[in-house]
Each structure stands twice: as structure tokens, then as C-alpha cells.
Amino acid sequence: MEKSRPLWDNPLQFVFACISYAVGLGNVWRFPYLCQMYGGGGFLIPYFIMLIVEGMPLLYLELAVGQRMRQGSIGAWKIISPYLCGVGVASVVVSFFLSMYYNVVNAWAFWYLFHSFQEPLPWATCPLNSNRTGYEEECEKTSTTQYFWYRQTLNISPSLEASGSVQWEQALCLTLAWLVVYLCILRGTESTGKVVYVTASLPYCVLIIYLIRGLTLHGAVNGLIYMFTPKLEQLSNPKTWISAATQIFFSLGLGFGSLIAFASYNEPSNNCERHAIIVSLINSTTSIFASIVTFSIYGFKATFNYESCISKVILLLMNTFDLEEDSLTADNLSEMKDYLMATHPQEYAQLSPQLKNCSLEAELDTAVQGTGLAFIVYSEAIKNMEVPQLYSVLYFAMLLMLGIGSMLGNTAAILTPLTDSRAIAARFPKEVISGVVCLINCVIGLIFTMEAGNYWFDIFNDYAATLSLLLIVLVETIAVCYIYGIRRFEKDLQTMIGRKPNWYWKVMWAFASPLLIISLFIFYLTDYILTGTLQYQAWDATQGQLVTKDYPGYALAVIGLLVAASTMCVPLGALVTFIRKRLKRESVPTVA
């Protein structure tokens, strides 16, 4: 079904939509973690290699398919071959899973944003106990930011089995998050074009403000040195290359169907090759830019914690051994500890369990990603800044823009195939279709607002998409190159942009990218098998820390269903098409 008119008023609006979708929370909370884990500045080497081999070619392929076929993911792959209808269905299923849990992050961002206007910030100090004679015991065993996250935000249960009840505050925030998404897509995907200018540009404004503030923070240099110091020995670690390829793959949003949906509303003559290069480079540059901001703040946090640790040790030693003021400093602490241990061995031995081993390197080595980085590490750094309310509002507003921008792409991947369907579009207006999709997602998403909701969030985040997307994009690449035909695809591109793709694009599509995806698929499949019993991190309130537990049997069953629900769409779609054609052929009467 031909689109009645293009969605985008101009090519720039399309680029903004792609950036708003591709540049998401992964750029802020996963890329810095990977830099930290896999070689600092050295990680950029495999990252940019994977961008060239995998990122740009596959992004170009999806944009070109959407623009040429003028359909959402289901219709586009059905045009290429009726047997590929399951590929589009698999993309819609994965996007549906992602929408169910991803908007919970926006709900958490709303929760923190609302609390950012308080003086002092609620995660700056421990709350008093019920008797008002001291602080909450759980908070004293951990940090104030962890207590606010795990207890006051999630009210997390001790295990997945203890599901608990729905937390009405989080349920209201989730409802608000879905209401905002619905208002952005109220008139179908057409209204998305008006929102993307804000969701794409505002995060950069906040990041620039944070960069200026971050670089002026005490200890920021320590974080930047840590980030840019290359650890080239990590290049021999296969996981470094796997992580770089995976980050490129998921940060660009390949396989979800969102990019195909966006491109399907382009003018047929739009230069999708140029836009694929622009979006890829902006996405990767944003990851590095966000990492500079993150590590400057991370360096401030690590330095603050290190100096606080040193101060506590000095105060403890001075009070215990009655030392003169200023006789013990951070510079001579090590020598004084050796001296006190030699001159007062018994007293020092009794005090030793209370003396923490303060290390700036250890603070910087503490690897945190995902919600831990977004809602714990950042909020801990913010509470120690001047005018923390201002920086808290800016930061969580930025998270909201990033989250909403990604949600616009996710919902477009679901809505475009639905509105492409004549059977559905003829019966219901776009507003109703959009409302039903948002309502279903919101109701199911209430699972993630329960006391055990964060554990289910991790299950969906870890297992709902990884293998499915690798299979989807692998089939997409093979379908274009070997079923539709690379030469036929070349002619389509020449018709659209006025020239055929050069040798680089063809080599990547036909050989390099499929081989890389197969390697990733085998790695993840092997990793799942060798891992044995799958485990998760549960919050132990009595210890004030995370502990490792095995997933119960029903959780493993859900994980299996999540993977199968999308991956099985591909072979089932081909099988159903084959059976229909066979039945149709048999029903045609033969001529005597």
C-alpha cells in the first residue's frame, strides 16, 4: 500500500528522527561502561572498526529497504519475498517487548525529576527510623543513593519469588510516561516529526552544560585520564571486540523495524546513503562525548569518595593515638600508619578492622552500567555539587528526552505495520490504534512496578532482544543480497539516489557483515550454554548490598518464551506462506 504522502516535511526532520531514536540511554549508560571495562581509549579502536564493518552498512541497508518499499517492516520484507513476512513480524514482536519495559526507565526518570525540587535532595541523607532516634538501619549499611534507589524508588523485594504488590507511585509515573508517549504519537506517526526536534536537540544542550560543569569539578581530570589512557592489552581479549560490535549493533537500533518505518515515509529520491553515514557518525560521536561528560563526573565522584575515606582514616587515627592536629595528612598517611603499627602494635591491631584501604584507582575501577550508572552514580555525584537541584533537574530531564526519543522509534515500529494494514486502518483511526497500543503496553508494564519488578526488568533487558535481533538482521542481509539480489538492489539505489553503491557497501553487505553477525550469534549462543544456570543480582536489605541468586524455574521458562516468541516468527512465517501457497495450488482445478 503506497503512502499517501511523506511523513517528513524535509530530509533534516528525518535525520532528527533517526538521531532521536538511535541516540538513546545506551550512549549515556553503556558505552562509558564498556570503555571502562575494555581498555579505556583503546576500546575506540575496535569500536570504530565495527562501525565501518557493521554499523554504517547495515543502517544504510535498512534505510534503503524502507525507502524503496514504502512499507513498515512486515510489508517491506513481504514485498522482497512472501516467505520473509515472519522477519517483519519478529521485528514488531521485539519492539513490543522493548516498549513494554523500556518506558519504565522514563517512569523512574519522572520519579527522580519530581524529587529533584526538594531541599535537600531526598537521596542526600538517610531518613530517620520510625522511633526518630537514629537513621534507617538499611540506609546506614549502604549509601544514601543506593537506599533511595532500591528502597524508596523500587521498594525492591529480596528475591524474584517474592513478587509483592504494585507500587502505586511507580504505577502513576509509568501511566504518565505512556500518556506523554501517546500525546507525541496522537495522530499516528505524522505527529512524531514535530517532537523529534526537541527530543534530539535538548539532550545535547544538557550534555554541553554538564561538560562545562564537569570539567570544572575537583577530580574531573582523574576520570578523563582514566578514560583516555589506552590499555592495549585488552585488544587481545575477544570480549572487547564482541562488546564493540554489540554496542554498535544495538545503539543504532538495527533490526527493530523502527528505521525501516521511519525511512518508509521518505521521499523516494531521498539520499539515504548520506543520511546513513551522518546518523552513524553522530551516534558514535555522541557516545564519546557522553563518555567525556560521564568520566569527568565519575572522576569527581571517585576523588570525593577517596578523599572522604582518607579524612575518616586520619580522624580515626588522630582520635585513637591522640596525635597533634596537622601531624597526619594524606601525603604522609602511609608512613604514619607504618610508624604507628611499629610503635603501638596492639592498639593498631585492634583498630585495623576499622581502617579502610583508600584507593583512588579502586574507586575508578568500580564498573557500573545501566540503571546503576544512570540513577545511583550520577545522583551521588549530583548531591555533592553546588546547586544540586538545578543539575538534578537538567540531568533527569535529559534522561526523559533520550528515553522518549527512543520510545517514538519503538512505537513507530509497531504502529507503521498496523496502519499499513488496510483491514485495520479502514476500521480504526490512527488515534485509536495508537491509544490501544499504548494502553496494552502500559497495563502489561505494571509488572515492572511491583516489588520484584526490577528483576523482571533485567530479564527483559537481557534476553528479550539480543539473539532475536542478530537473527533478524542476518536474515535481512541475506535476503537483500541473495534472495532479492544485490544487482537488483543496486538498480533500486541508482533509481533513488542517482548512483549505484560502491564496492565498500557491496562487500560489507554480501560478506563482512553476515560473517560478523554469525560470529556474534555463535558467541552469544555458546555463552548462554556455557553459563549453566542463569543467575541474577538480588538486593539484600540486611547486608545493604547485592547478592547473586539462581533464577527459579518459571523465570527460565519466561526467558525461553521471550527468545522463542520472536525468533520462531521467521521460520513460522515461511512455513505458513508455504502451506498457504500449497493449499491454493491444490484448490485450483486441473484442466482435463
Image (cartoon, helix red, strand yellow):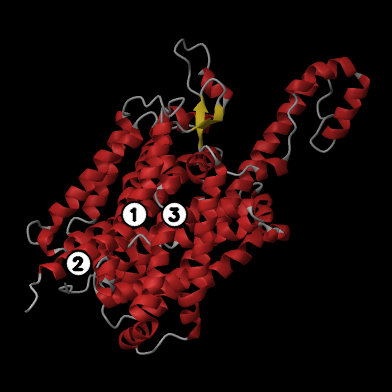
Name which residue type carries label 3.
Leu
Dot 2: what SS?
helix
Residue denoted by label 3: 467
Nearest to N terminus: mark 3 or mark 1: 3
Foreground tag (2 vs 3) = 2
Name which residue type carries label 2.
Arg
Q: Residue shown at 13%/52% (left/top)?
A: 432
Please state the horizontal and vertical placement of residue 473, each as a whole percent of the image: 41, 64
Name which residue type carries label 1.
Met
Q: How far apart are the two marked residues, 3 and 1, measured between alpha carbons?
A: 11 Å
Dot 1: what SS?
loop
Residue denoted by label 2: 582
Nearest to N terminus: mark 2 or mark 3: 3
Please state the horizontal and vertical placement of residue 48, each as a whole percent of the image: 57, 68
Residue denoted by label 1: 568
> Does residue 454 show up?
no
* Residue 450 figure quarter: top left
Please state the horizontal and vertical placement of residue 100, each as a whole percent of the image: 31, 45
Please state the horizontal and vertical placement of residue 559, each as a whole percent of the image: 40, 42
Q: Residue shown at 9%/71% (left/top)?
A: 588
Hey, which residue is sitting farthest front in the picture? 592
